[in-house]
Amino acid sequence: MSSEVARLLQPIQLGTLSLRNRVVMAPMTRERSPGGIPGPDVVAYYRRRAAGGVAMIITEGTAPDEIGAFGAAIPRLNNDSAAAWRSIVQAVHEEGACLVPQLWHVGAFEPSLVGMTDTLRASSRVSPSGLAATNHPMGRAMLQADIDAAIDAFASSAALAQRLGCDGVEIHGAHGYLLDQFFWSATNRRDDHYGGGLQERGRFAVELVQECRRRVGASFPIMLRFSQWKQLDYEAKLFASPAELEEFLRPLVDAGVDLFHCSTRRFWDPAFADSDLTLAGWTRKLSGRPTIAVGSVTLGNDFKSAQGKQFAAIDQDAIERLNAFLDRGEFDLVAVGRALLANPDWVRTVAEQGANALRPFSRDMLDNFH
Ligand SMILES: Cc1cc2nc3c(=O)[nH]c(=O)nc-3n(C[C@H](O)[C@H](O)[C@H](O)COP(=O)(O)O)c2cc1C
C-alpha cells in the first residue's frame, strides 16, 4: 500500500458504525426499481461497490411514501420492498461494507425543470408553500396533517431500515427537496411556526429527526445531508456566516443527528470568506459531530458544470489533497459519487495502483448504471 493513501484507508469507529476506511459511496438516483421495488440488478450494483472496498454505501434516494417519490422507478422503503432491501443489506454486509439508505421526499421539486422525467402528477406535490423555487409554483402548501404524515412516513422507514439490519439512515435535507424547501426562505413563505427565521424553518427537520430518534432508539445512526446549493439555484445560500450555520445545526444535534453529510460540488472549497475551512470542516467544528465531505473527488470538474455532465477527467492530486484534509481533522469521511460509477473498485484501485489508474467518468455510464 502506498503511504500517500494511508489515512484514507484507516478504519474508524463512529458510534456504532465500524468503518474499514474513510470512503463512502455517495447517494445516486438510478430510477431502476420498477414499482418502487429494487430487483436483483440493484443488489448486484451495490454488491459490486461494496466488493470494491468502500466502507459505507449511502443508497440512492428512497421514498418513504408515494407522494414523496418523483417517479415509479424510484425505490421505496416500505413493507412491499422490505424483502428486496434485506437482500441488498445482506449482499453489502457479505462484502464487508455498511449500508445506509437515504430517505428522500422531493416535496415540490419538478424533475422536468432539470431534465429528468416525472411519472407522478405534479398536482399531487406538497411542500411548505407550494413553490419549487422563486417564481416556480408547484403543487400545494402542506397542512399540519401533511406535515404529520410526512414525519410519520420518514420515521416508519427509519424504523424499518433498522429492522432490516441497515447500519443507519440518511435523511436527505439537501439540494432543494422537501426538507431543504423548508430550510430555504425562497421556498418557505409560511407564517406559522414552520416559517420565519432559520430556527423556524428548521423546525420541520428537527421534529422529523426527533420522531425518527424516538422510533429507532439512542444508538441507531441518523445522518442528515444538507447543502447550500439547490437544484434550481446553484448560488443559493442558507447560511451567510458560521454563526448562521451554527444556529441551523444546534437544534438538529439536540434532536439526535449523529453525523452530518455536507454536500458541496468541490469538497475543498472554503465555505465562507476569511477562512479556508470547508462546509464539512465548519460543520464538524460547530456541531461537534463527525462529518462527510463530498464533491469532485478524483474528478477534474464538478457534477453540475456543463463539462461535468459530459466527461470528468481524473484529478491526479486528489488523494494527496484528501489526505491533507483528513490529517488535520477537517472531516472524518469522504463520499465519492461519479468516480465510483466509473470505478466500482475505486478503493482497491487507489490503494493498489494509485489514482492514475482510475477510469474517467462519462455521461453514458448513467445509461446502464452497471
Ligand atoms: C446520477 C446522480 C444521481 C444523484 N442522486 C442523488 C440522490 O439521490 N441523493 C443525493 O443526495 N444526491 C444525489 N446526487 C449527488 C451525489 O450524491 C454527489 O453529491 C455528487 O455527484 C457530487 O459528487 P461527485 O462529484 O463525486 O460526483 C446524484 C449525483 C449523480 C451524478
Image (tube, grey):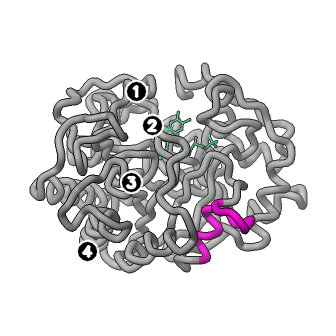
In the rendered view, would you say 182 is above or below 91? Answer: below
Residue labelled with disc 2? 232
Task: Provide the secondary structure element on which disc 3 rests.
Answer: loop
Task: Locate residue 304, reporting x and y percent.
Answer: 59, 35
Residue situated in front as seen by the camera: 213 or 242: 242
C-alpha distance separating marks 4 and 1: 37 Å
Q: Disc 1, disc 3: CB below 8 Å?
A: no
Looking at the image, which is closer to me, 72 or 48? 72
Give the crowd class for mark 3: few <14, some 14-19, many >=20 residues within 10 Å: many
Element marked by disc 4: helix
Q: Which residue is mark 3?
A: 184
Mark 3 / mark 2, whichever is N-terminal: 3
Position of 202 compared to 358: left or right? Answer: left
Q: Is residue 273 magenta?
A: yes
Which dot marks residue 214?
4
- The residue pinned by badge 1 equals 113
**In percent of the image, x 28 and y 28: which residue is there?**
72
- Disc 2 marks a residue whose amino acid type is Leu
Horizontal placement of 84 versus 54: left or right?
left
Earlier sequence position, callout 4 versus callout 1: 1
Magenta span of residues:
271-285
In percent of width and height, residue 97 lies at 56, 55
